[in-house]
Image (cartoon, grey):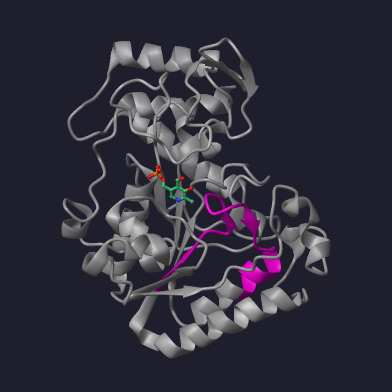
Amino acid sequence: MNPRRPRGSHRSYDPLSHLVFLRSQGEYVWDEQGRKYLDLICGYSACNLGHAHPRLTAAVCEQISELTWAHGGQSQLRSRLEETLGSLWDQNTPPGRKPHRYSKVWLTVSGARAIEIAWKLAYAKRPGSTIGFDLAYHGRSLASALLSDTERSEAFGPHGSIENHATIPFPRHLHGLCAPILMPDACNDASSNPQEAHAEKSPLCAECQRALEQASQTFEKLKSRASILFVEPAIGARGYYFAPAAFMQRLVALARSYDLAIVSDEIQMGLRRTGPMFLCKGQAWEPDLLVLGKSLGGGILPIPWPADWRSKHSKFSKRQISDPILNARGIFFVVCLAPICPNRL
Ligand SMILES: Cc1ncc(COP(=O)(O)O)c(C=O)c1O
């Protein structure tokens, strides 16, 4: 037990949990001894703009003094954020491809909840079991943990039944922080630019081929019983593994042939963490539902975005859109301002 840790505080799993930080600015944090640390963790991508950015802090303070919360959650600010997110999606469409028409954006209060909303959206369209990567991490709420690695789900006993969730292997050979730089050559992609890599042209390495074959067997075994595929195109919390574009394109094409709705969890690795604004677009494939979070709130407050792009999966009744299925309106306006502000920086 660390004597400096404030009484009653929960010990985190983090190896740095013995440190107590007092201050942060930009890329640095300071502990109570005044020691300065370069923060390469950045709140697991939540602080991609750095700590305590003066413009973000000023924007949040200004907003708090104007309007903190309003019933129903609707505001000019919220509309602006939704518009900004929609146009970001369009602007980041790879050259030569048509953007999908801007569909719907839901804003909510945690990544886990955003994943659950995406799950509900996909499930409401076509009920069925789920499939996900064996290395995936989708959050700590009961439902999102069930989609995460099996060890964690099993801890929930009968409620953690994974009967309705099948896993497929994530290719593990591109591992570590330098892997994205090595990605094209390491996997014999025909193109050094993932945006130009086309599923039918780019050869796959043996590891990706094996992972794809296992995915194909799983899809075939489950057939119409499965309806949703959750993908984390770059694995964050489970240790920085990267899937090549050609692998992801083929997996998505295969999943589509089984009519699976595809949910891309880019909560940690989206928003330029690996280069492209949206990892799926950078790899030239598109999901039915895209889930973002973490740095969308500027590292100040959580503001995940489970967005629904493809019309095929976005026709919901009024009842489905209202509580308790989809309602995610409990967000604070102050949260809205934080992600808008980075566009002005
Ligand atoms: C890929 C991924 N999905 C979901 C989550 C859950 O987000 P939150 O902690 O905001 O619930 C995380 C959090 O680290 C994550 O990295």
Q: Is residue 88 magenta?
A: no
Can residue 314 be seen? no
Along the viewing direction, whichever of 276 and 133 lies nearer the viewer = 133
Along the viewing direction, whichever of 101 and 8 lies nearer the viewer = 8
Quarter of the figure with the N terminus: top left
Numbered disc total: 0
- Taking the image as shown, residue 295 lies to the left or right of residue 174, namely left
Residue 154 in which image quadrant: bottom left
Residue 38 sits above or below residue 149 on the image: above
Residue at 55%, 42% in the rendered image: 88
Quarter of the figure with the C terminus: top right
Residue 320 sits above or below residue 306 on the image: below
Q: Position of residue 101 (x, y in %)?
A: 48, 56
- Taking the image as shown, residue 66 lies to the left or right of residue 208, namely left
Bounds of the magenta segment: 228-250
Can residue 15 be seen? yes
Residue at 27%, 61% in the rendered image: 156
Q: Position of residue 99 (x, y in %)?
A: 56, 56
Residue 113 sits above or below residue 98 on the image: above
Q: Position of residue 29 (x, y in %)?
A: 57, 19
Q: Position of residue 267 (x, y in %)?
A: 48, 47
Along the viewing direction, whichever of 18 and 323 lies nearer the viewer = 18
Residue 106 sits above or below residue 3 on the image: below
Residue at 39%, 69% in the rendered image: 312
Along the viewing direction, whichever of 40 and 70 lies nearer the viewer = 40
Residue 195 in which image quadrant: bottom right
Q: Is residue 232 magenta?
A: yes
